[in-house]
Amino acid sequence: MIELRENELVFGFPEVHERAVFRIDFQRTLRIPDDGHEYPLPAGLGSFPLEHVDDFPRSVPPAWLSRGGVMLPMHRAEALWLNFDSGRYPCAVKVAAGKVNAVTGDLWSTSLVRGPSPSERATWRGKSRVPQDYMVLPKQPWLDGFNVGDGLIRQFVAMPLGDGYSAEEQVTGRAEYGGLQILAYPMKAAAYAALPPEPVARRSMVLECAGAPAPDLGLGLGGLMHQDIAADEYGADVWDLDHPARCFVHLADAGRWKAITGTEPPTAAPTPEQYLAAGIPWFDYRMSGPYVPGSAALAALASVAELVEADRGALPDNESIPVDRVVRVQPRGRGATVRESA
């Protein structure tokens, strides 16, 4: 069961356990420069608005209606990150951009490729031959981009679908889906009953900031950012594969959002200069324990900035920026550190 509640997607599995619920909201954020430097996590600047695709049958593309799900508006070259909240109940979550797995770079599948076995965990750190194509909540509090290196991601950046910028087009050679696809499996109730308390981390901050494009956007690769993808330390057998929940998240070009919904989209995300002038901090969160190694397939893809430059252009607001205020986020059990600013 998936519900849309106040710009959050709520995945519920009441047939498994009353506490088997997790939420996702999609955070607006600063697009970090793609300048070869590795940046900390930028703040969340408020949730993107979400709407049911089925509420606008006359104005959305027919392909969106056939897939169902929800939609949100993004400006071109704007970034986003996914904010997860599962409380204490673990879930295995797969995320794909245009049906390209954001953790491995593989094409979409509904199966779970397992993490390391208990005997492998001690020596698994950084071993790419042991794959895991999903994330484990609540250990994984957010996802900001494509997993391209050990502890490194390339930021999700929205670009017009069909112009060759998206990871989907580079991997498949086609501009077919765009957007995001999310698939979740809850932990089996018996496995949950045996769990000790699990720490969680949250980050949150809100900042007010200030043609006829096609409606479809895909996600390309932006700048480099420090972010771990937690390895599955529970083991593959704990996930209830009989009770999946799956949702498409379509990305509508902000220039078409009003034509589709009749409402105004959010203003453009802040520039680096506005971010710095507002005194907004950066955040650093490092997980304990093993992590999923970077995907060589994703690391080999060209970034949006590289593709723009190949077309003899320049990606705006791509100059290096100073990072002078970094807040360390540490999970401390229930009521963990919150990424928040005045």
Image (cartoon, rainbow, N blue to C red):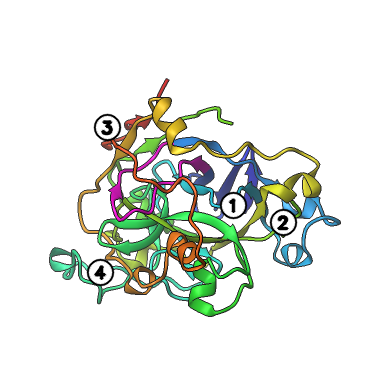
Decide: few, some or many residues near mark 1? Use Cα within 10 Å; few <14, some 14-19, many ≥20.
some
| Residue 340 appears left or right of 163 | left
Separation (CA) of disc 1 from disc 3 = 28 Å
Measured in 3D between alpha carbons, the distance from the residue under mark 4 to the one under mark 1, in whole angstroms, is 38 Å
Asked if 327 appears above or below 234 in the picture, the reply is above
Q: Is residue 320 magenta?
A: no
Between the C-alphas of marks 2 and 4, the distance is: 45 Å
Point out the image quarter for the C terminus: top left
- Badge 2 amino acid: Pro
Which is nearer the eye, 252 or 163? 163
Q: Disc 1 residue type? A: Arg
Between discs 4 and 1, the one toward the N terminus: 1
Q: Earlier in the sequence, mark 3 or mark 2?
A: 2
Q: Position of residue 6 (x, y in %)?
A: 64, 36
Work out whether mark 4 precedes mark 3 in sequence or the reverse, and give the earlier one. 4
Secondary structure category for the residue under label 1: loop
Q: Residues within 10 Å of mark 3 (few under 14, many from 20)?
A: few
Q: Which of the two discs, 1 and 3, labels the residue nearer the N terminus? A: 1
Q: Amino acid at mark 3?
A: Asp
Q: Alpha carbon of mark 2 to alpha carbon of mark 1: how far?
A: 10 Å
Q: 332 and 252: which one is in front?
A: 252
Residue under numbered circle 4: 116
Q: Are marks 3 and 2 in contact (CB under 8 Å)?
A: no
Looking at the rendered structure, which numbered label has been put on residue 76? Answer: 1
Instruction: Please name the residue shown 46% across and 41% down the image.
Output: 30
Residue drawn at 25 percent across, 48 percent down: 287
Residue that carries the numbered disc 3 in the rendered image: 324
